[in-house]
Image (cartoon, grey):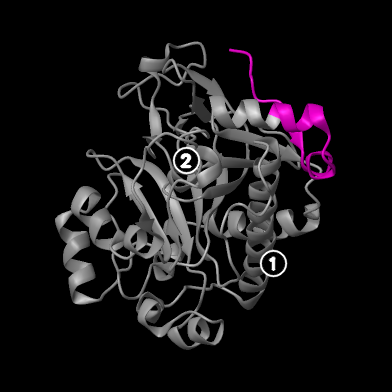
Amino acid sequence: MPTEIAPIDLALAESGDPATLAALRTAGENLGIIQIVNHGVPQATIDDFHDRIGAILALPRDQKIPLASPTGHPYRGWRQWPDDFGRLELERFTIGEFDSVDEAVAAGLDPRYAADFAHPNVWPSPDLREAARAYHEAARLVARRVLAVYARALDVDPGVFPTGDGPDHTQFVVNNYPTWTYDDGGSTDPAAGDDERKLLLLEHADGSVLTVLHQRGDYDGLQGQRADGSWVPVPIVPGALQVFTGSLLTRWTNGRLRPGRHRVVAGGTVTRLSSGVFWHPRVDTVVEPLAPFVGDDEPEFDPVLIWDTVKDRVEEYLRVFGRPDQIAAWREGRPYVAALADA
């Protein structure tokens, strides 16, 4: 299936180039997924983090077990995600934006929002922490720049989105997708129909304003969903970054920008690695349809406080996806490591 995702030159968009802004508007309204190039993030910054985290995720399982969250937090450190038969579908390393409550408060976060950072990040080495922080900051700034050019593409003031000053709220997740060579559970043939493919990550749209994603690997496993429900691959382009519209940006634009629904299909004997920085402005920001996108009609969405969308995410995750032993580990404040059939 040919791709429909043309790269967007971010520097050209920022210069006001009409053709680039028109392409950006079309992509945002129809798919909610763009691929940006000429974004100014040094390739060395991108590679340094992904080479380091890739090497850690390539270690034998017994060497990674100590990297699980010491408190069982599902959004800290390393964990593996098996299917119902114990076969590995996804491996994940998650990094909180701050290492402690004190660090969060020192950065300007109101103490009433900082309790989650009592659950520490897991850093295998100081070098990984340094590389992760450098890449995270670069991705955070890219998100703000893309938001501004989306405003220009939609013919509104670039400052229309009330992002305010930091600290921004982010989530930082690395997904490592394993080989999948089992005969059941879905096809790994790229020519298979959309409903026949083996999914390693189920279809969804992110709850962020924007998500900045880097991907590398041996096959184009990431797919975006068209308005008609069919799927288009997002190609791996060296140096490019993918940006998804999240549900909060759809709310800000009163539905003008489509949420980027996506999924990941298995590649058979090959693997892929991706990282996502899920970007929001301050957690005390109220997101509601903005006047330039509403006009004389009633808004399509109600206002929502960002804090209300993120404060219960651990409990919501465990309620939907948690297994009894994982929930017990979280309640007892101890590490959780999923059992695998072939471990």
Residue picked out by circle 1: 134
Residue 125 lies, in percent from the top left, at 59, 75
Q: Residue placed at 28% from the left, 40% from the top?
A: 83
Q: Is residue 219 visible?
A: no
Magenta segment includes 3: yes
Q: Quadrant of residue 67?
A: bottom left
Residue picked out by circle 2: 250
Is 56 on the left-hand or right-hand side of 237?
Answer: left
- Which residue ends up furthest to the front in the rendered image? 296
Q: Residue placed at 80% from the left, 26% from the top?
A: 19
Precedes in sequence: disc 1 or disc 2: 1
Q: Residue placed at 55% from the left, 67% from the top?
A: 168
Q: Residue placed at 43% from the left, 31% from the top?
A: 180
Residue 207 lies, in percent from the top left, at 41, 48
The magenta-colored residue range is: 1-23
Magenta segment includes 335: no
